[in-house]
Image (spheres, rainbow, N blue to C red):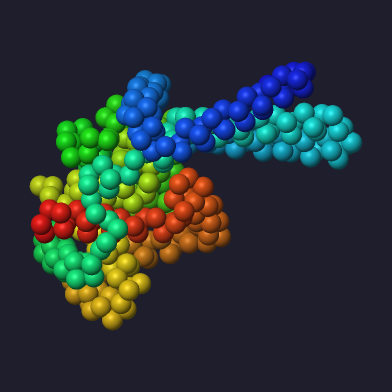
């Protein structure tokens, strides 16, 4: 924006953003309205725009845009501080106003381009899953069945030399023909790698969606064990699912009966971890009992995962975790990072309804 731009126009810009944000807050207060008008009407159509602009690119343009946004905001802050130091108060005030307008505009676009999906009708309600009452006996029974499945699959599984790009394509194809989740938008189903998988490992991230470009990303450097699960999770975000537990659930359901044993193993491997963590909060003795039932190979996978992420753990990981926890709480997930674990309710309800 030109530095000569009158303050009046900047005030109008900020005022318009505030008015639109207030209107947005009203709109998302009704999940049925969000589901009908945004998630199932506007969003699938809007997705054609980023698909045409960025979908064909073999690299992540979103990562570059993230960098440009950060640099732009840093420039405005530094310029304002320098102006204050030089006692150029009018110039500093203008820069601060532009900063506020820019932040409000980014907030608006973030929501209009994707984040309104955080407020849609829950998947559990759309699939008529009873998640409010979960019996411990059902939890233990299903956990034991899944441990047996995971142990059996892992015994003859070799995932070290699999082509990850082929896995991406298989999961994308799996979701394109999906008929279990009618709430998913199928306009764009495509996963990419970040500019630097090593860098996002330092953030403790296995995958993410860039809402500004509608690009799904998966960390290609992390252990392969649950790679198909992560791909499916991130694509579920791209297809219009905001809540983390729901993306986990969709990944579980889509992979649990797949013909590829690696895909099935990834589903059970992730599910078992969430079910064990939930059990730990209820009964530590039972938790230890069922943890001990895991085969040596499954335990080796768990240790390999833990070792990988520990190598990247540091202040950046801690800072990223704190930020993302608050981010989730601000976006209709009051549990924060703990939201991921609520997938256990969905899995148990689904398995119970299916008669397993």
Q: Residue furthest right?
A: 87
Point 74% across, 34% down: residue: 96
Q: Name the quarter where the C terminus is drawn.
A: bottom left
Is 138 above or below relative to 106? below
Is 94 displayed left or right of 299 in the figure?
right
Q: From the viewer's perspective, is residue 46 above or below residue 320?
A: above
Q: Residue furthest bottom?
A: 285
Q: Residue at x 34, y 57 (%)?
A: 342
The residue lying at 67 percent from left, 34 percent from top is: 100
The residue closer to the viewer here, 31 or 109, is 31
Q: Position of residue 40 (x, y in %)?
A: 32, 29
Q: How many marks?
A: 0
Residue 331 image position (x, y, % from top left): 48, 45
Q: Is residue 305 above or below residue 10?
A: below
Quarter of the image where one finds residue 338: bottom left
State the residue in front, 200 or 320: 320
Residue 147 at what x, y percent from top left?
17, 67
Residue 324 versus residue 234 in the image, above or below: below
| Closer to us: 132 or 21 | 132
Could you tell me if residue 271 is visible in this image?
yes
Horizontally, residue 257 falls left or right of residue 268, namely: left
Image quarter in which the N terminus is found: top right
Quadrant in the rendering for residue 53: top left
The answer to which of 93 and 38 lies nearer the viewer is 38
User: Which percent across, then down, holds residue 51?
Assistant: 36, 24
């Amino acid at each position: 924006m030109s530095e000569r731009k009158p303050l009046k126009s900047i005030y109008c810009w900020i005022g318009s953003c505030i008015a639109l944000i207030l209107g947005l807050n009203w709109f998302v207060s009704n999940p049925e309205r969000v589901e009908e008008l945004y998630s199932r009407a506007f969003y699938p159509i809007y997705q054609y725009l980023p698909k045409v602009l960025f979908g064909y690119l073999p690299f992540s343009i979103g990562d570059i845009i993230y960098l440009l946004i950060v640099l732009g905001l840093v420039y405005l802050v530094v310029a304002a501080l320098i102006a204050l130091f030089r006692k150029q108060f009018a110039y500093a005030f203008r820069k601060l106003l532009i900063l506020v307008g820019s932040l409000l505009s980014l907030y608006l676009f973030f929501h209009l381009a994707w984040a309104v999906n955080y407020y849609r009708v829950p998947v559990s309600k759309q699939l008529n899953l009873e998640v409010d009452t979960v019996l411990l006996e059902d939890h233990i029974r299903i956990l034991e069945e899944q441990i047996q499945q995971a142990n059996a699959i892992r015994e003859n599984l070799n995932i070290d030399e699999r082509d990850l790009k082929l896995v991406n394509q298989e999961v994308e194809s799996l979701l394109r023909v999906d008929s279990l989740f009618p709430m998913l938008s199928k306009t764009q189903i495509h996963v990419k790698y970040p500019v630097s998988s090593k860098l996002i490992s330092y953030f403790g991230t296995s995958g993410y969606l860039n809402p500004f470009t509608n690009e799904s990303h998966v960390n290609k450097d992390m252990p392969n064990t649950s790679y198909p699960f992560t791909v499916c999770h991130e694509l579920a975000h791209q297809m219009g699912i905001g809540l983390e537990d729901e993306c986990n659930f969709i990944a579980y359901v889509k992979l649990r009966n797949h013909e590829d044993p690696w895909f099935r193993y990834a589903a059970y491997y992730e599910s078992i971890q969430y079910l064990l963590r939930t059990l730990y909060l209820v009964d530590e003795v039972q938790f230890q009992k069922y943890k001990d039932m895991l085969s040596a190979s499954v335990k080796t996978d768990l240790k390999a995962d833990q070792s990988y992420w520990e190598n990247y753990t540091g202040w950046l990981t801690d800072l990223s975790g704190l930020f993302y926890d608050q981010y989730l709480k601000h976006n209709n997930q009051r549990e924060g990072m703990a939201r991921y674990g609520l997938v256990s309710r969905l899995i148990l309800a689904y398995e119970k309804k299916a008669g397993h």
